[in-house]
């Protein structure tokens, strides 16, 4: 009876595994040679294993991998596929089709996995005695960090918020926390451009910019911050973001930053280019009229030209 077959489904972070009891398959007429395939019959990523009394099929948890069909709603990403089993290596008639699906709550990681072309940057870090780590950073459109920008560049309205998220994609997330050391903007793609506007410096937000909010830093395997869209003064129409990251061993050191106003401006900045993630270009939709001025130059050399437009002028004096 086909209804006696009780496959087990394991929805992993990177793989989807379907397990079938060999005794139950034998009861349905299957012999020792069982061929399994998914909607994409030629998928090279599928793994077919014999594990004791179980037959397992493993495929990547990725859109379009092995024929995966991705459906997405406001809260979950859902992968659907069909496992087909035949009794011989020569496929004539399909003996059994099993439909299955895995639903993943949308978070930063899942949203990047399910996006077709997210604007993302990554860096690999090797720690002696600890292994290899991969850190990713991406641009998001929403405060939940579940809707990444896609394509070659991001275009934002002047008053909109830009959400930046970074996560430890590969490595020991139990012991290591992700720390955003320095995050800054430049008008060119050069991370060493002398024209810099710091959003996070020495792990602490720029308190001169009230639009900056650091939601997560040094407390988990991911970091998140937001800032209102701005452009550089002068003949610049693009912004590029750069973040120097560090892995912090939570069992050996204090990872969560302690930020005081005296600390923010006193410590010098030394940036390791090997640990920097780059994002951009970022452009703005619609330029405000030059005749509208809602602010006056502040002590740090900032001009407010229309709501939400931040123009760093004397960057050497900033933060």
Image (cartoon, rainbow, N blue to C red):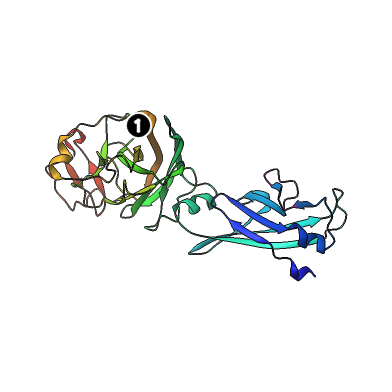
- 195 left or right, relative to 50: left
Q: Is residue 144 visible?
A: yes
- 90 left or right, relative to 277: right
Residue 191 against residue 304 in the figure, above or below = above
Residue at the image position 69 percent from the left and 52 percent from the top = 56
Tell me where residue 214 appears, x and y as whole percent. 29, 50
Residue at the image position 60 percent from the left and 57 percent from the top = 10
Tag 1 secondary structure: loop
Residue 242 against residue 78 in the figure, above or below = above
- 206 left or right, relative to 19: left
Tell me where residue 216 appears, x and y as whole percent. 32, 51
Residue at the image position 87 percent from the left and 49 percent from the top = 90
Image quadrant holding the C terminus, namely top left
Say which of 162 and 296 sits in front.
162
Residue at the image position 49 percent from the left and 47 percent from the top = 118
Bin the neighbour count of mark 1 within 10 Å (Cα to Cα): few under 14, some 14-19, many 20 and up: many
Residue 172 against residue 190 in the figure, above or below = below
Is 169 part of what is drawn in magenta?
no
Tell me where residue 263 appears, x and y as whole percent. 16, 40
Say which of 114 and 316 sits in front.
114
- 49 left or right, relative to 121: right
Tell me where residue 19 appears, x and y as whole percent. 68, 56
SS assignment for the magenta stretch, majority: loop
Q: Is residue 285 visible?
A: no
Using the rendered view, name the quadrant where residue 17 is placed.
Answer: bottom right
| Residue that mark 1 sits on | 191
Q: Which residues are magenta?
A: 37-46
Residue extending furthest front? 52
């Amino acid at each position: 009876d086909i209804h006696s077959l009780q496959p087990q489904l394991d929805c992993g972070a990177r793989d989807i595994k379907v397990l079938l009891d060999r005794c139950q398959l034998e009861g349905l007429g299957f012999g020792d040679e069982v061929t399994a395939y998914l909607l994409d019959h030629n998928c090279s990523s599928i793994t077919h294993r014999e594990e004791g009394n179980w037959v397992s099929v493993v495929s990547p948890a990725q859109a379009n991998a092995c024929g995966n069909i991705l459906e997405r709603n406001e809260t979950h990403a859902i992968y659907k596929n069909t496992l087909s089993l035949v009794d011989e290596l020569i496929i004539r008639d399909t003996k059994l089709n099993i439909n299955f699906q895995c639903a993943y709550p949308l978070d930063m990681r899942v949203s990047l996995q399910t996006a077709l072309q997210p604007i993302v940057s990554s860096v690999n870090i090797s720690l002696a005695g600890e292994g290899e780590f991969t850190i990713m950073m991406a641009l998001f459109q929403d405060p939940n960090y579940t809707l990444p920008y896609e394509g070659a560049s991001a275009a934002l309205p002047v008053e909109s918020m830009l959400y930046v998220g970074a996560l430890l994609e590969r490595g020991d997330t139990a012991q290591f926390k992700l720390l955003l050391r320095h995050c800054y903007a430049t008008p060119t793609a050069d991370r060493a451009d002398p024209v810099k506007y710091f959003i996070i410096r020495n792990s602490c937000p720029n308190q001169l910019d009230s639009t900056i909010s650091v939601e997560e830093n040094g407390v988990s395997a991911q970091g998140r911050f937001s800032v209102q869209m701005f452009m550089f003064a002068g003949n610049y129409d693009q912004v590029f973001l750069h973040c120097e990251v560090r892995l912090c061993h939570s069992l050996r050191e204090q990872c969560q930053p302690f930020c005081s106003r005296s600390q923010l401006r006193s410590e010098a900045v030394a940036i390791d280019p090997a640990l920097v993630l780059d994002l951009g270009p970022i452009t703005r939709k619609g330029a405000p009229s030059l005749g509208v001025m809602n602010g006056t130059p502040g002590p740090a050399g900032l001009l407010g030209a229309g709501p939400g437009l931040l123009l760093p002028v004397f960057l050497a004096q900033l933060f």
